[in-house]
Image (tube, coloured by chain):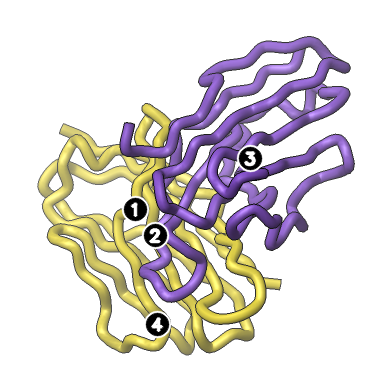
Amino acid sequence: GAGVSQTPSNKVTEKGKYVELRCDPISGHTALYWYRQSLGQGPEFLIYFQGTGAADDSGLPNDRFFAVRPEGSVSTLKIQRTERGDSAVYLCASSLSVTGNTGELFFGEGSRLTVL
Amino acid sequence: AQTVTQSQPEMSVQEAETVTLSCTYDTSESDYYLFWYKQPPSRQMILVIRQEAYKQQNATENRFSVNFQKAAKSFSLKISDSQLGDAAMYFCAYRRGTSGTYKYIFGTGTRLKVLA
């Protein structure tokens, strides 16, 4: 498809388990962002990539969270030893670049993570 | 650090009427972008309107317009001729224009209800 694709759309896991969330950005978009959105709240920044490198990971809450983008396209958000507080919708967004453009983010539909 | 504040958790408007959503932000930067994003119940966020801080003219997109007051750090969204399809969460967002981090900072959102 032409839009940002996120899988899975829903994930239910048990406390302590490992989870991977995948994001496939729009083709040609070099910037990729991860956000976390809790119920009734605004998106909370986690990390963004420009190409393969993490340009700003200041939003990752702790070392249980990690994200990669090895080839500058698909990105995976990895959460180790999940906790109930990790339950949220994880949003991925991409943009053409971080500079020299209109700044519009294109969002996926999100991955809803529920930790029991 | 930059912050974005939306002080109206919920607003209602009669169909065909006009409504204004408020947003204030705090930054020491002079070059930045401001955005309004819409998130319908389906969850996927879409861009409604964008404003570059260096432009004095307020942005407009069909029925949507902004009132950008740079000195007051205010960025309100006006929706004219409201339609049932406008019902959604609306998020105000900020991003630096040049250098440093290009993360987007979102407010907590305003839920807009449109009454038939």
Front label number (4 vs 1):
1
In the figure, is residue A33 to the left or right of B39? right
Q: Secondary structure at mark 3?
A: strand
Chain of the residue where label 2 is placed in the rendered structure: A
| Residue underneath mark 4 | B69
Q: Compared with residue B68, is residue B104 higher up or lower down, i.e. above or below?
A: above
Q: Position of residue A22 (x, y in %)?
A: 59, 30
Q: Which chain is purple?
A: A
Query: In the current view of this chain or complex, which residue is farthest to the front?
Result: A71
Q: Amino acid at mark 3?
A: Arg
Query: Colour in which chain B is shown?
Result: yellow
Q: Which mark is residue A104?
A: 2
Q: Amino acid at mark 2?
A: Glu
In space, the residues marked 1 and 2 are separated at their CA atoms by 7 Å
Chain of the residue where label 3 is placed in the rendered structure: A
Q: Amino acid at mark 4?
A: Gln
Task: Of the two numbered discs 2 and 3 on the same chain, state the one appearing first in sequence.
Answer: 3
Q: Amino acid at mark 1?
A: Leu
| Residue underneath mark 1 | B47
Front label number (4 vs 3):
3
| Residue underneath mark 3 | A36
Q: Compared with residue B48, is residue A111 higher up or lower down, i.e. above or below?
A: above
Residue at horizontal 34 percent and vertical 53 percent from the top = B47
- Residue B48 or residue B69, whichever sits in front: B48
Chain of the residue where label 4 is placed in the rendered structure: B
Residue at horizontal 65 percent and vertical 35 percent from the top = A76
- Specify the quadrant that holds the N terminus of chain A: top left
Mark 4 crowd level (few <14, some 14–19, many ≥20, 10 Å Cα): some
Mark 2 crowd level (few <14, some 14–19, many ≥20, 10 Å Cα): many
Q: Which mark is residue A70?
A: none
